[in-house]
């Protein structure tokens, strides 16, 4: 399992009239978490695109438990529970407030896409090789 964390402070412009993080902005927080998780592996989305790989979102689900509030420092935990073997990759996101309370969970499924061939493709070998060690089972 691969886990990366990053923090985001809820900005005023991201909130609704109640001072809650607007529900549509949770997907943006998931995206920040994904981008930082990939960066922690030594890549950026831009570099993947330069390698000929796009990663469009194919599916998104989100479950809200309690609100994120204006000026809260949110911890975004991004988890890969499985090493992708085909063209799809699934990111699990968990958002926590400063007290460590779970605010939201989401799952975002992306596909690896070759824009030249105009078809799905597998994860780049370089990225696969960076992720694989996190999924090796210990045999004691």
Image: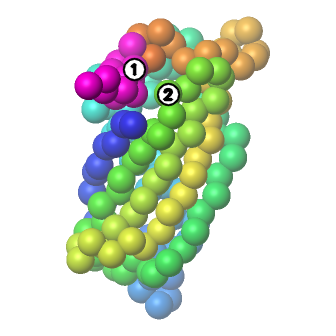
Which quadrant would residue 41 be assigned to in this image?
top left
* Location of the N terminus (image quadrant): top left
Q: Is residue 23 left or right of residue 74?
A: right
Q: Is residue 24 left or right of residue 95?
A: right
Picture residue at 42% right of the left edge, 86% below the top = 19
Of pointers 2 and 1, the one earlier in the residue sequence? 2
Residue wearing tag 2: 83
Question: Range of the magenta residues?
Answer: 129-140
Label 2 residue SS: loop
- Residue 104 makes an appearance in the image: yes
Q: Is residue 135 magenta?
A: yes
Q: Is residue 36 left or right of residue 83?
A: left
CA distance separating discs 2 and 1 = 7 Å
Crowd around label 1: few <14 · some 14–19 · many ≥20 (10 Å): some
Which quadrant would residue 138 be assigned to in this image?
top left
Picture residue at 29% right of the left edge, 49% below the top = 5
């Amino acid at each position: 399992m691969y886990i990366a964390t990053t923090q985001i402070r809820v900005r005023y412009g991201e909130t609704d009239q109640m001072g809650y993080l607007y529900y549509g902005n949770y997907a943006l927080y998931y995206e920040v978490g994904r981008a930082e998780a990939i960066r922690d592996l030594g890549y950026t989305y831009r570099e993947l695109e330069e390698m000929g790989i796009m990663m469009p979102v194919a599916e998104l689900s989100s479950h809200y438990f309690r609100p994120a509030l204006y000026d809260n420092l949110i911890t975004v935990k991004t988890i890969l529970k499985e090493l992708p073997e085909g063209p799809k990759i699934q990111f699990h996101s968990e958002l926590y407030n400063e007290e460590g309370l779970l605010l939201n969970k989401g799952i975002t499924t992306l596909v690896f896409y070759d824009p030249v061939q105009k078809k799905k493709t597998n994860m780049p070998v370089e990225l696969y090789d960076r992720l694989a060690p996190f999924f090796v089972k210990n045999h004691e």
